[in-house]
Image: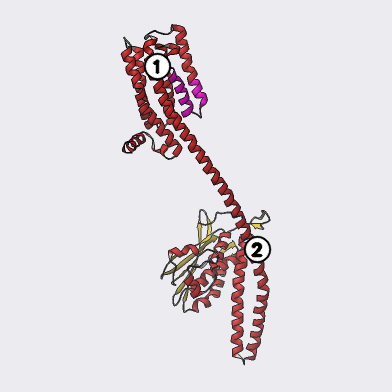
Amino acid sequence: MLIWSRLVRLMDWFIPAAAKLERSEYGLAQNYVFTHLFGPLLSQSISIFLYLSDPHPGFACWTIIIGIWLFWTLPFVYKYTGNLQLSALISVELLAFASLFGAYFYGGVSSPFLPWLLVSLLLGFFYLSERPILVVGLFTFNITGFVIAYLAYGFPDLLSHEQLSMVGWISILSATIYMSWMAIYYANMISMRSDLEREAERHRETAVRLREAKDMADRANRAKSIFLAKMSHELRTPLNAVIGFSEILLDDVELDGKNSRKKADLERINSAGKHLLSLVTDVLDLSKIESNHIELKIEKFDLDEMVREVVATVEPMVTEHQNRLVVKCPPDLGVVSTDQTKLRQAALNLLSNAAKFTRDGTVTLTVQRRKSLVGDWIEIQVQDTGIGIAESDIGRLFQNFGQANRSTSSKYGGTGLGLALSQKLCALMGGGISVKSEVGQGSSFTIRVLACMTKQKDTEDNAGVVLNFAHSPAA
């Protein structure tokens, strides 16, 4: 194991970092380096025997010896070029040249060097499988040169066939060992590809099942949203009747002025009815958004006037818990174009939350316009000095029916719909809500929506009105 680990480190030294990123390419690179480090060792016996057998080792003998030694330089070529195909091309050409050159000078068509010509062709298709024409062209060029040399000069008779027989055995043995290694590697690669194909097929089947499950869940979610929308709409009618009749009875009691207990009971009925109506309205709006049936009413309005209305509405809720309301607003915010009702609803949700979770503290409302290269934005920030939110709980704030934690729900009440609905409404208006908070130090929620929206109506799969905005949503 120690020897193998050192061998792997040696091979990795020649392999560029980019080739190590992909498993198949890394394996091919390892095989190339290994065969070009240890393959020439098999051929050294040919060099030695040829040198000792040739009575006058000259140009032919030394060319073959140098050619065999040159194979050891190819891993360095690969290391410094980072191009495996270029290195393989040089290797194939060098092997084809050495085998044909050796065959020309030592034995002709019965030369022991010719088996390596077939090896070079197989290696060409192995390493350069994406460029078969180049491999065939290279092979044809070398054969053509060999034939022309034979027709022009014939085969030199440097060694007898008896002398070459031993070289032939050595050459065939070396070529057999080399091709056996390549065959084993190729078989392993085919097996690995088969495993990968089977794994890919399993992943495709899993993806199909997940897609079907997602479609079923989406259909169930749409059906749930439609059901909630219908039920919420049906609930509003009797609730409006309860609230209306309780207000009529309150007026009668106030005119009578004699039964204070009856007045208190009617006020409780009226307050509970309004609270229940607001919850039903939130569910209805949320269901409409999820079922793609909500529409924005884009209109131009004075932002200063809307802020005054919001402050007037929320002030009693803020002061109920001995809190102080601070409003920071420039004198002239100007006219904006968006859905006033939904923007007011989102702002009131944030302010009512701040009032609910703050005792004897301060709630600060900051409104401003920010113009930049990417658009004109309305920013409404609500800060409080209340209980704050842990960082781990912030992710649940904008989930449907989600609150920071269970203790918050049990102590302060609420359904967890307000923030989820406000976030979705702001997204429809081209923006969103961000939050910063720390436990015990208070929270800061910021609404950021487009100040100037345009509405284009397109129908899409009967999903109602599709809203397209001139600017991308706020980050």
Q: Position of residue 198 (x, y in %)?
A: 53, 42
Q: Is residue 245 toward the left or the right of residue 139 in the image?
A: right
Where is 185 relative to 297, above or below?
above
Q: Position of residue 114 (x, y in %)?
A: 44, 17
State the mark number for residue 461.
Answer: none
Q: Is residue 180 toward the left or the right of residue 202 in the image?
A: left
Where is 18 relative to 390, above or below?
above
Disc 1: which residue: 168
Q: Is residue 52 toward the left or the right of residue 473 in the image?
A: left
Q: Is 136 covered by the magenta stretch? A: yes
Q: Residue furthest bottom?
A: 258
Where is 88 relative to 402, above or below?
above
Where is 361 relative to 302, above or below?
below
Q: Residue at x 54, y 45 (%)?
A: 202
The answer to whether residue 59 is seen in the rendering is yes
Model colouring: secondary structure
Decide which of 425, 166 is in the foreground and name it.
166
Q: CA distance from mark 2 to mark 1?
A: 85 Å
Instruction: Identify the main secondary structure in magenta.
Output: helix
The answer to whether residue 86 is seen in the rendering is no
Instruction: Name the secondary structure under disc 2.
Output: helix
Bounds of the magenta segment: 111-138
Q: Amino acid at mark 2?
A: Ile
Q: Amino acid at mark 1?
A: Gly
State the mark number for residue 226.
Answer: 2
Q: Residue at x 44, y 19 (%)?
A: 115
Q: Earlier in the sequence, mark 2 or mark 1?
A: 1
2 and 1 marks in contact (CB < 8 Å): no
Instruction: Name the secondary structure under disc 1.
Output: helix
Residue 426, by quadrant, is: bottom right
